[in-house]
Each structure stands twice: as C-alpha cells, then as structure tokens.
Image: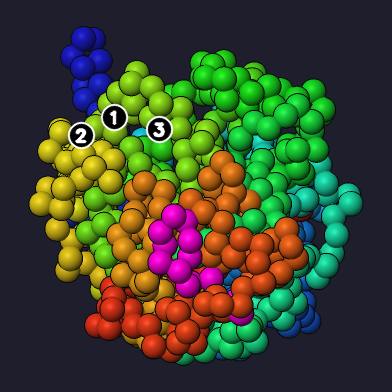
Amino acid sequence: MLLVMKMKKFYVVILCLLFVLQGCTSASTNIENTVIEKTDDIFDTSYVHQINIEISNEDWEDLKANPLDKTKYKVNVTIDGNQVNGVSFATKGNTSLSSVAADSNSDRYSFKINFSKYDKSQTYQGIKKLNLSNIYSDATYMKDYLSYQMFNEAGALSSRCSYVWLTINGEDFGLYLAIEEVDQVFLDVNTDSEGDLYKPESEMLGNIGGGKKQNDNKQPEEENDWQPGDGNFSMPDGMDMPEGFDPFNQGDGNGQGGFNPGNMTPPDGNNPFSGDGSNGQGGFNPGNMPGSMGGFGSSNSASLVYTDDNLESYSEIFDNAETDVTEEDEYRVIEALKNLSEGNVEESVDIDNTIRYFVVHNFVMNYDSYTGNMLHNYYLYENDGLLTMIPWDYNLAFGAFAMGAGNDATSLINQGIDSPLSGASESDRPMWSWIVSSEEYTEQYHTVYQQFITEYFDSGKFEKEYDRVVNMIREYVEKDPSAFYSVSQFDTATARLKQFCLLRAESIKKQLNGKLATVTSQQNNADKVDASDLNISSMGSFGGGGNGFNPGNFFGGGDGFNPGDFPGNENGNGFNPGDFFGGGNGFNPGDSSGNSFGPGGFSGGNSGFNPGDSSGNGFNPFGGGNGPSDNGFNPGGGNGFGSEVPSDEGNGSGRNGGSQQPVGESEEVEEL
C-alpha cells in the first residue's frame, strides 16, 4: 500500500513537470535563457499585445479630418483576441495632438479607449479606460515605458504599461504604448481606495477646467485659447504676436524650422535679450508679465504653494479633480498645503511615496513637469490629509526638454540629485523642497536612491531588461507604417538612451559616495562623469520626427536652441541659462516675486522678456518702460533678432537644446 502511494506521488510529480514544460513552451518567450511567462493581462510586458479597433469608415475619416474635436466614437475593440463591443474611442493629448494635426503627412494620434462610456458596468480586466500613446517625440520608443518601469521598480505609485500593435479595421497602424489610466480604478488597485485625485495644470497650458468637477460645464475645445497647431493660438492679454512668429511650425527635420526666432521680425523697441545681465538688467526676463510665481499661467496653485484659505486660489488644482470631491475635501488639501508651508511634513505629506517619486523623477530628469517650468504632468493624490504625487507623461524625459543644457550631455548626466529644479526656485516647489530642507529627509532620500541604484543598475537588471525590450519591439518599429522615426534612428537612439542611463547611474553613485557634489553648482568639472560623446537630441525631442521647438539658426549658429555663451556669462546673464540646472540663474521663472512666464527676475531683476507689464507695453517689458534705446526684440544689442549673434560666440555649437516645445507636452484632463 505504501509503495502504491509513493508511485502515485511520483506520477503526479511527473505530470506536473510535463504541464509546466508544455506551458513554458507554448506561452513564453525565451531571451538569453530567461523564461518569461505570458499572461492575458493587458499590462504583461513580456510580449507585444494586439489591439484592433473596428470603426466605421465614416467615423474614421471624420476622426482624421477633425482630430482636435476629440469626438468620442462608438467602436468595437479586440484585445489579444478578446472582443469588447460598444466602447468609446477618441483622440487625446494637447500639444502632441495639435502638432500631429498640423502635419499633413501623419494621422498618428494618441487615443483613449473608454470601456464604460456607454455601459457603466463594462470594463476590460477591471479597467475602465486605456490610454494608447503614439510615442511622440521619442526615437527610442522607450522613454515613457522605461520611466514607468523605474517608478514601479522603486516602489512608487505609478501606472502600468505595455506595448501594443494597433490595427484599425484590420489594417496595420503602428506600435503604441498602452498606459493605465490614473483614476478611481487605479486607486482601488494600488491603495485602500480612499482619498482623492487631482491633475494640477497651469492655466497658461490651457487644460484647466477639464476635470470631473467641471465636466458638465466644460467649454468646447475650440474655445480654448491654448490650441497649439490649430491656427487659433492667441497671446495672453497685453501681448502682441510678433510678425513671423510661428511656435508650432514643425520644421523640415534638418534642424531648420520649429520655434525659430531667427526668422522673426521684431516689434520696434523690444529687445528681451539686450543688456549685460548684470544687476538683473537684460537677459530673458519676463519681469512683470501678467501672472504669478511658479511658472506659466495666472495662478500658482499648480506649484502647490500655500497662499491663503480661499478655494478660488487653487483653481489649477480643484478644477482638475479626477474623482468626486466636496468642499470639505478641497479644504483638506489646503490644510495640507498650509501644514507643509509651516514645516509640518508628517502632517501633510506621504513621505515614503513622495521620496520614491522624486528618486526616479530626478533620475530621468523630466523638466516638462513639476521640477521644471511647466506646472503639469503629475497627479496629486490626497488621502487623510497627506499629499503625494503620481507620475504622468515622460516622453520628454532623459534630456529631451532640457532647454538649458541641450546637447551638453555631461551637464545633464551629472545633474545634482539635490538640485533638480530647472526654471524654478525651491520656495516655489514645496513638494520637493521639504526633502532637502531637512537633513533627516535628505538622508532618507539618499538611502532610497542608493537602494534603487544598487538593486536596479548594479545588479544588471536594468541592462538585461532593457536589451530584452529593445529586441522585442525592434521588428515592430521596423514595420511601423506610421512611425515618426526610422528603424535606423531607433537603433541609434536606444543605444544612446542605454548609455545615458548607465552614465547617469554612475554619476549618482559618485554623488552618493561623496566623490561628486549632490548640488550642481558645487560640483567640480574634474569630478564629473564624462558624457561628451553622448548626443542627446538623437534620442528624440519635441516635434515628432526631430523637429518642433528647434530654433535652427536661433542666433546665427545652426544648432537649435543654443543659449551657450549668448550675451552673458555662466552666471545666467543674457539668454544664458548658465546654471540652468543649478542655482536658479538663466531662464528662471518662478521666484518669489515673479509672475507667470519667468517671474520677476530671470536673473533677479525686472528686465528681459517681460510682456504685458504694469504699463501695458505688451511684448516689450523692460521694467515698465516703452523699450526704445537698446531694447527692441533684438538679441545682441542692435543686430536684429537672430542676425549677427552667433551661438557659442561664433562656433555654431554651444548648448544646443535641439528640438523643444514652447510650453511643454501636456495631456489634457480627460472628460469622463
């Protein structure tokens, strides 16, 4: 009897092994002897998923003809062989949407699928919405994907994502990135389901008022002042559009075009670039432009700075609520911001998650977000009076939005982990500054950073996973009929991105072990990790196929947005970010006295690019004067805008920001 039982156990074990082996053979991908099992989960990253959109020809043609309308079309969708009928399908995005809409050669938009739009009980694998990113401005196809993987690796609240091959009515359309929506379902999966979500957005970026709270009264998209690329762009009150100014010209892909002031005709008496930069005179300085501190816009609440106890003072937060909120909920957010302003961190911040957020955010250096001048692209989550941040939209990370350093890769790679702000001061970014204002929290931040570097980079996990994903998606990039970049550009870009990450990790290790200062302005050049052979712009930048905000011959050079040694010096004089990534000089809107587009003192004064000052002089600010003398919209003191002032004093190089966008890539607060 005992022998029979033993034989039965033996056969059971053999059968189990056979089933396991069979499963691995039929449903797994073998990369370098590593078995990765597939699942039906839409966010399984081990393979490229298949999504087909079944839409009527009439609706598809209407979508392509009117993408900016964001009309919701009723379609059927099949995901990995599973069909879901009667779902909503619409274009999404803001600047990328408008830019593609302006490109007669492309219909590659980002899309949003809403499974429960017409049937509130319908979901797909429990999710109600799925974002399909067109991977705009990213030759690597991996910046968003890699950023989200890093956030999850570090243990920060973050969306899941995976690659999908998208077809429309059975026809190949392209390789997309499916990204989990940050909504109530996200909270149900990742938290205790309590608390509220907001997606703060600077008013200047034009997405304010689109949240759940404002949905019933939302204005049509065409009434929004900020619709880049659709021909309806308008300047803020008190400003006139200079003749020849076209910030959304896509350019020709050869470094010419995009936001190219070199071809602008300056209005008389307006020279935002004149002056020597001393004592705050001259330089790109918005001065008293209408608005308030902390970045673009007429409100500063997206900076999370506490101002007062009035709900109206925080419209950039509350008008973009993503969950159902009450006034009581809103006052709880204000109380948390007040506590934070008074140094009561434990009573106002989810310390652990926020530190983990900034560890990764500062590693990938996404300046099209909270640590830059574009106060958007993050979610604010409040639960029981504690605040934290959730990442969103990282296609312009890894240097793509680093206007001040551009192709000066060494500066980017060695950016101090304790001085991550660009175009803002610590007083205007309280959700960051509490960390470095305390030795205890700084030490905790460094400890988490060390853990992240050790477990993800030193272990070899990053390189192994990176190579696997590149190999997995390359064949899809090669056959992508709507791609913004060629497969050869992809090959170059992915090699550069991998190099970027490894060098960045090397620099941070030096910073953590005391061999390189953690504050950029205190670093010695000799101690920095050398990245001089790394071409940042080849990884993709704003403008889809490498165009966009690329001033071409901005100052007669030919290397794009190149402050280099423009009139001024390394202390941020003239339009010279100098310590753009350091001590707050250069293009630095957001000081305590400043307003809107470069508050109050680009270099600490009241001159520079300061339209719409108190005297109503529009595009000619300079301390409230009318700007005759040596002002004028003419960098370099009288040579005409972009005529005789060479980049880097004549050698055509300097700091080349490559292709950038004027106000940041922004995802709209989507209507529910």
Q: Residue at x 72, y 81 (%)?
A: 231
**Toward which corner of the image does residue 648 lie, by quadrant?**
bottom left
Q: Which residue is mark 1?
A: 446
Q: Which residue is mark 2?
A: 512
Q: Is the residue under label 2 in contact with that under label 1 (CB below 8 Å)?
A: yes
Asked whether residue 106 appears in the rendered view, the answer is no
Depicted 659 relative to depicted 37: above or below: below
* 10 Å crowding of disc 3: few (<14), some (14-19), many (20+): many
Q: Give the structural element (helix, strand or loop) at label 1.
A: helix
Depicted 247 relative to depicted 96: above or below: below
* 10 Å crowding of disc 2: few (<14), some (14-19), many (20+): some
Of the 4 image quadrants, the one containing the N terminus is top left
- Amino acid at pointer 3: Arg
Q: CA distance from mark 2 to mark 3?
A: 16 Å
Q: Nearer the viewer, residue 579 or 180?
A: 579
Q: Which residue is mark 3?
A: 356
Depicted 476 relative to depicted 3: above or below: below
Q: Position of residue 389 (x, y in %)?
A: 53, 36
Q: Position of residue 605 (x, y in %)?
A: 52, 54
Look at the image and give the residue range highlighted in magenta. 269-282
